[in-house]
Amino acid sequence: MSQHELVLDTGQGSGAVSEGRRRRSRLGLVVTGVVGGSLVALYAVAAPFVAPALRRVCLPFVPATTAQVENVLRVLRTRTGTLVDIGSGDGRIVIAAAKCGFQASGLELNPWLVWYSRYKAWREGVYRSTSFHISDLWKASFAQYSNVVIFGVPQMMDQLEVKLANELPSSAKVVACRFPFPTWVPESTEGEGIDTVWVYDAKTFRSDLHRKTGKTLLEQKSHPHS
Ligand SMILES: C[S@@+](CC[C@H](N)C(=O)[O-])C[C@H]1O[C@@H](n2cnc3c(N)ncnc32)[C@H](O)[C@@H]1O
């Protein structure tokens, strides 16, 4: 090989090498972008499902069974008006209640579940008689609802008793799914095993609260610490 050929050959070789390097670094950037983007997307989707487990009261997304939903509707069959499902999950109870004529709302911490519930309500033709709110149940007021459904966990039921007894009108009914309230006396129950639901009358649990505290609710509100 002449010296001239050798120079040309070496030049082409280094050009090919640097082109190869450029290609590899482009590929590296694409792979990093795709992996990074996927991780961010995965985190955005998964975080709202994991977050409830990290709260003081862990209330995870566990959807009601078909029998549970049927039991809720059965015990509320003579009722009308507004209904709220506290922690409404994928909206199945709210949508089923709207189909039975209720003006039904869901309160839910997980935004993905709220958006999915709105989509499902629209698809099933009950968009107008449902509403879904991204909201923390402990910060919401339930004063406007005449029917309340809760599928909670035992650790939260005592606190929720106090909140609902203070906020609900005397005409309200509360339906607890799977776990009953600890001190309220149910007026009826429906179903069995994990599908059991308990029905409570607000007149009863509100007057029990008055008896225990010896004060009217108005007095408690005006002098909460006296
Ligand atoms: C056991 S699931 C019940 C779902 C639905 N009610 C059903 O019966 O199919 C409880 C739901 O409450 C939601 N949740 C947990 N903590 C909450 C909070 N602080 N405020 C509102 N919703 C909450 C969870 O994301 C979950 O979807």
Image: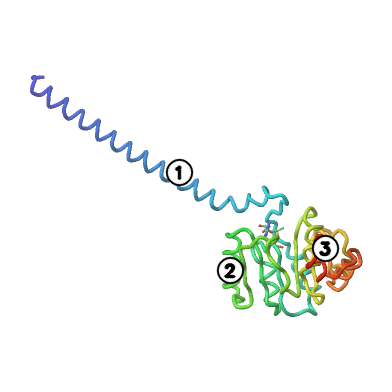
Q: For the point 49% across and 48% down, which residue is it?
A: 40
* Residues at circles 1 and 2 in contact by the CB criterion of under 8 Å: no
Give the amino acid at mark 2: Arg
Q: Give the mark nearer the N terminus: 3 vs 1.
A: 1
Front of the two marks 2 and 3: 2
| Local SS, label 2 | helix
For the C terminus, the quadrant is bottom right
Relative height, residue 144 to residue 114 (above, below):
below
Of 51 and 206, which appears nearest the observer? 206
Tell me the element at label 1. helix
Residue 35 is labelled as 1
Residue type indicated by callout 1: Val
Tell whether circle 2 marks a residue whose Cβ is less than 8 angstroms from ligand 1: no
Cβ atoms at labels 3 and 1 below 8 Å apart: no
Q: Earlier in the sequence, mark 1 or mark 2?
A: 1
Give the amino acid at mark 3: Thr
Depth check: give the residue in front, 164 or 14: 164
Sort mark 2 into few (<14), some (14-19) or many (20+) by Cα contacts within 10 Å: many
Q: Nearer the viewer, residue 135 or 154?
A: 135
Q: Name the foreground residue: 218 vs 85.
A: 218
Measured in 3D between alpha carbons, the distance from the residue under mark 2 to the one under mark 3, in whole angstroms, is 27 Å
Q: Which callout, 2 or 3, points at the residue further toward the start of the chain?
A: 2
Q: Residue at x 8, y 23 (%)?
A: 4
What's the CA distance linking mark 3 and mark 1?
Answer: 45 Å
- Specify the label residue 196 is tagged with: 3
Percent across and percent down for residue 224 are 80, 63
Where is residue 26, by image quadrant? top left
Q: Is residue 47 above or below residue 200?
A: above
Mark 2 — residue? 118
Q: Quadrant of residue 217?
A: bottom right
Q: Quadrant of the N terminus?
A: top left
Q: Position of residue 196 (x, y in %)?
A: 82, 63
